[in-house]
Image (cartoon, rainbow, N blue to C red):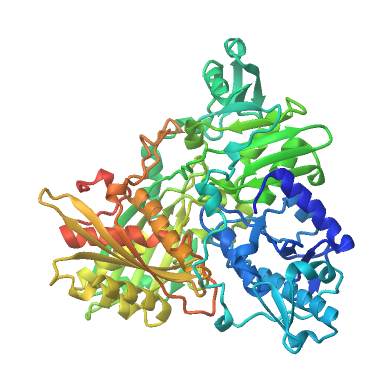
Amino acid sequence: MNTSTTMSLSRRKFLVASGATGAGLAIGVYPSGKAVADNHLDEVNAWVVINPDESVVIRIARSEMGQGTLTGLAQMVAEELECDWDNVGWEYPTPRENLARDRVWKNYATGGSRGIRESHQYVREGGAAARMMLIEAAAARWSAAPEDCSVSKGVISHKASGKTLTYGQVAADAAKLAPPLEVKLKDPSEWTVIGQPKMRLDTVSKLDGSQLYGSDINLPGMLNAAIKAVPVFGGKLKSFDADAANKMPGVKGVVQVGNNAVAVVADTWWRANKALKAVDIEWDLGDGARLNQAEIVERLDEGLTADTKLVGNQAGDVKAGLEGASKVVEATYSYPFLNHACMEPMNATAKWTEDFCEVWCPTQNGEAAHAGAAEAAGLPLEKVEVYKQLLGGGFGRRGAPDYVAQAVLIAKQFPGTPIKLLWSREEDMLQGFFHPITKARVVGGLNDDGDLESLHLRISGQSILAGILPQALQNGVDFATFQALLPEGDHSISYSVPNLLVDHAMRNTHIRPGFWRGVNVNPNAIYMECFIDEAAHAAGKDPLAFRRGLMQDNPLGWAVLSAAAERAGWADREANGKHMGLAVCHAFGSYVAACAEVSVNDSGAIKIDRIVAATDPGYCVNPQQTEAQVEGSFVYGLSALLYGECTVTDGKIDQENFDTFPSMRMAHMPEVETIVMPSGGFWGGVGEPTIAVAAPAVLNAIFAATGKRLRDVPIKHSDIDLA
């Protein structure tokens, strides 16, 4: 039911009026479970709309970028609403609406695998409250007690009389009722929609081509813009000569954008981009232009042994433990800059006037896009509207509103004309928010029995928060750096080591950092899981048994690890001539593990044959989506392991397209078998936790097959070939 902007706007007008006209039902719910009426401005939770034609519109604030959050959230509302799933549709409410209603839909940001795990309570309460009001309206028609009525698939029944009414028939009456003060949610044992593999709400529109993305927007009188910003972060625009470009066909103007970019506006994007290449631009590249990859790596190497007080996890006395160890194991690993490389480049369409500004854009954070657009427009938030589109890839990149602000700044120079800004692939690659580069030195101490009693893991490298959210640092510490290595919480370390120190030597660069899918769990899982494997072999122990000895206080982590190992045939691997590797971690609130199997052909080339993955997200809303997320995350994670790398020359990112920043080919993709094993009692993420375990499991399997330890990502620089 996601339709055009015009239809969405007309439905919004309908919603505002529905309380007065009785044309339908719309409700919101407080976090405490208390429902409030549509005409209040202090509602803070999700909305359910029932139309007279029996259609159910579920309004989703979180962004859909292929991960299935849209369908998962709708399932949770529908579970409590007891509607017919076949009647369910959806729409995005706008951030301007959210602002006007005191953020009734709450958080618009989608990232960190939080879309469902942070929304589940209030969206389910919204569905439950709506169900109660609809039943009450039907009971009133029958002069019956609500408790004597029941509902199934949107049909309300009165047991004593045998009468029935549909949701659509009583929606108008329900809209006039006072919402319930107490809302009770179903026990998980009663769920019939949550936990089921329901078909995604966005599948058909994607298959038949009707689904619009930001780059598909086409408005009356629209012009197109291509842009080029200074290629070195921190640089500025000095001057530009547009004479040649202005004479080219279709060009409507060449404009400066902020203090660091030039854009060409033309009747088509191809003409705009061609003319952009004819603009003679002079840049002030700034201090960053003096920096090369070698200097960046040198700083990281220095940080591996430097004094630091940025501690993420500490127990016992690691120095004394290492000094008294029977055997000391040491290894150094590295992880590079990475680009999100979304298939759909950054884009936004803006229409600006002195009184109002409208923006159509794919964004992971509607409120950030709203704020960025308002600042660029020079207008208050209430005079700016952002219409979210489905994303052609996000992975963390579309959480920033830089491209939205650019579109508005260009549109301001063409008042009243819609301007669609589309980045070229090269611009998209150069102007990213990059996964931070890090290295790690890990030192472990084994006792006489081969048990790991001491561990020092030093991370040296860039801090994301220091680069883009310095206000989030805690006494100078970026705790996001320690994901999956913290003492407790959603990113706690998987192992109990008596003497432990995990610290960070912060070594920032001019390269703009960002939240790349899985964020710091990706390198941290490699650093920890590959080292644990090395320590197990140094102790002469089976890597699975070695891990079990360290996981006595982590039963859920052990459960997913042992499940993956058992399904993969770990115990019989040597007898069957299989080469396997393991990995486990706790991230984004979920417990995940992988067992990878590789083979070696006659020429010595490696083939990744199979990965068995196990995940415990607490509750699983849609098992099919969970499996798809695991499989998709492995494509992303293994692409980084095999090929992913961004390097710096004279301050500029070297990789400008997919020829130098490739992704995994289908021929190299292993068979993936996913075990979804929700244990209940908590809500974990799905999309990001699993990405991290594929790479270390494969690296450990490669060692099992070849005896070679590959410690630097990507492994394309090693002497290992892929079959």
For this rendering, which residue is in front, 344 or 192? 192
Q: Is 296 rendered above or below residue 39? A: above
Find residue 193 and report its horizontal and vertical position in percent: 57, 72
Find residue 649 and report its horizontal and vertical position in percent: 40, 32
Residue at image coords 47%, 31% = 426
Residue at image coords 66%, 33% = 407
Task: Please state if 371 lies on the left or on the right of 458 as rendered.
Answer: right
Name the quadrant containing residue 170: bottom right
For this rendering, which residue is in front, 210 or 38? 210
For this rendering, which residue is in front, 240 or 640? 640
Find residue 552 and report its horizontal and vertical position in percent: 37, 82
Task: Please state if 118 lies on the left or on the right of 103 as rendered.
Answer: left
Q: Is 363 rendered above or below residue 155? A: above
Name the quadrant containing residue 251: top right
Q: Is 538 rendered above or below residue 556? A: above
Find residue 269 and report its horizontal and vertical position in percent: 57, 25
Work out whether residue 260 can be spotted: yes
Work out whether residue 483 can be spotted: no
Quick one: which residue is furthest to the left in this view? 602
Q: Is 430 rendered above or below residue 100? A: above
Task: Please state if 124 lies on the left or on the right of 316 as rendered.
Answer: right
Task: Please state if 366 lies on the left or on the right of 459 as rendered.
Answer: right
